[in-house]
Amino acid sequence: MQRYYFDFYIKSKRESVKYANSILSGIHHHLRSKALDNIGLSFPEYGKTTLDGLPLVGNIIRLVSTSEVALFSVRGGEWFASDILNGDCAVSKIMPVPEGVPEVCFIRSRKPEGIARRMRELFPGQRITPYSVNKADPTPLAMIKVFTIEKPLHMFVAFEHAQARADGKFNSYGLATQDNQLTVPWF
């Protein structure tokens, strides 16, 4: 089945984390409010830049789906207009995914959260956070901040190469999970 995509380009390198978090929050709210589970996220620049020793998702946020209509609902939404109109971000056209590109997984990882919780049990009174656990890991994960209805949510995003395409239902953040390792094209 043919897949389609479009990209958000964050123009400001200095403010890339701020705008990425803003765009990702808007995507989450849109996917959740419309109950869309057929849109996955890809980060073509994942890990190419770092901040404080941790990989960043980069200045391109790519949305991928088998449904052009679903992508258009996100692309045409008013939720991101302020950043776009301010000239801080640009949006590409919806285009077909090129044939024969590799597949990857972007997975919401809860590993740093679980390790931090266990370490706090072992060492009560010490300040151990998922962030500090992730930073100490030899292969740290990118961290994103999504503003949910309840509160800001810090999530860790793992990147894995995949052998073959795996379709299915993404979570409301557009990511795969450990139990459901869906793929997106990597180009």
Image (spheres, rainbow, N blue to C red):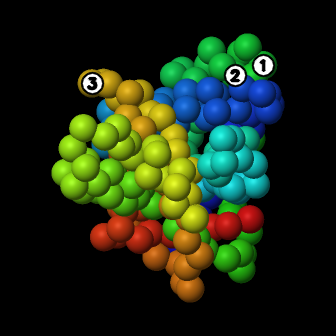
Could you say where residue 95 lies in the image, as x and y percent from the top left? 71, 54
Q: Which mark is residue 158?
A: none
**CB under 8 Å between callouts 1 and 2?**
yes
Image x and y of residue 181, in percent: 41, 71
SS at mark 1 in the image: loop
Which residue is painted at 28% across and 54% down in the image? 119
Label 3 belongs to which residue?
150
Residue 110, x across and y down, in percent: 35, 56
The label shown at residue 84 is 2
Q: Is residue 66 left or right of residue 150?
A: right
Viewer-proximal residue, 88 or 75? 88
Q: How far apart in space, not on screen, are marks 1 and 2 (Cα)?
A: 5 Å
> For mark 1, what is the residue?
87
Q: Position of residue 41 (x, y in %)?
A: 54, 52
The amino acid beneath tag 2 is Ile
Which quadrant holds residue 176?
bottom left
Which residue lies at the image location 54% right of the left edge and 21% below the top edge?
A: 78
Q: Mark 2 or mark 3: which is in front?
A: 3
Q: Is residue 106 visible?
A: no
Q: Determine the CA span between mark 1 and mark 3.
A: 29 Å
The residue lying toward the viewer, choosing from 161 and 66, is 161
Residues under labels 2 and 3: Cα distance? 25 Å
Asked whether 10 or 101 is in front, the reply is 10
